[in-house]
Amino acid sequence: MHFSLMDPRFIITVVVVVMIVGIIVGVYLERRKKHSLALRNQFGTEYNRAVIVHGTEQKAEAKLADRATRVEKLNIRELAPTERARFLAEWQAVQSRFVDHPKGAVTEADELVTALLVARGYPVAEFDQRAADLSVDHPLVMENYRSAHAVVVRPGGVQATTEELRAAMIHYRSIFDELVQVQVLTEQKSVA
């Protein structure tokens, strides 16, 4: 069978193929848009940070999706009531030392948050990996976590001001509260 360019069957075939390709492209773009929106909603400001770090939305979304896949494979768990009580008592002790030894207390707060992450099932890792893992389920406190940690590991012996240490302690408190009280937050979300 031979088609000529003016043959109605050829024109109809081309129109149908173009429509099918258009529909496929439209469906693909809609799915990408929904996927992007889902990642933006899940990661919040962490999404914007990933775009800046990785250069494009597509690269950032791939990295964020990889994070989520990695964290799904981890055995993240709630704290037992005795563990929760122990961590709360340790936090009170660290917080009470802030007045007399602010730098030491902030360092202890960093160590306590790390211990809390390990107790919850996050792997022992470098800070960047811990932060990436944590961002999957706790994106709202990630800026606080990064800011506080930056004060603790400030390079070159540059001393943090009392105000910077106070802010770091407040930031550690926000991530600590988020991690130690997850069960309560989860129950509230399921009721709502």
Image: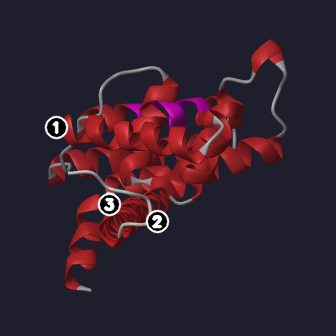
Indicate whether residue 21 is drawn in magenta.
no
Q: Label 3, on which residue? A: 181
Amino acid carrying mark 3 in the image = Gln
Residue 182, quarter of the rendered image: bottom left
Q: Position of residue 172 (x, y in %)?
A: 55, 47
The span shown in magenta is 107-114
Q: Given the current orientation, which residue lies at the most extreme bottom position? A: 192
Specify which label sits upstream in the sequence, 1 or 3: 1
Q: CA distance from mark 2 to mark 1?
A: 27 Å
Read off the residue under disc 2.
37
- Asked if one can make out residue 161 in the rendered structure from this viewpoint, the answer is yes
- Indicate which label's residue lies in the foreground, 2 or 1: 2
Asked whether the beta carbons under mark 1 and mark 3 sit within 8 Å of each other, the answer is no
Binning the other alpha carbons within 10 Å of mark 2 as few (below 14), some (14 to 19) or many (20 upward) gives: few
Q: Nearer the viewer, mark 2 or mark 3?
A: 2
Toward which corner of the image does residue 155 lie, by quadrant? top right
**Residue 56 spot, x, y in % from top left:** 62, 42
Membership of 108 in magenta stretch: yes
Is residue 67 found left or right of 175 in the rendered image? left
Q: Is residue 159 left or right of residue 112?
A: right
Q: Which mark is residue 75?
A: 1
Asked whether residue 98 appears in the rendered view, the answer is no
- Of the 4 image quadrants, the one containing the C terminus is bottom left
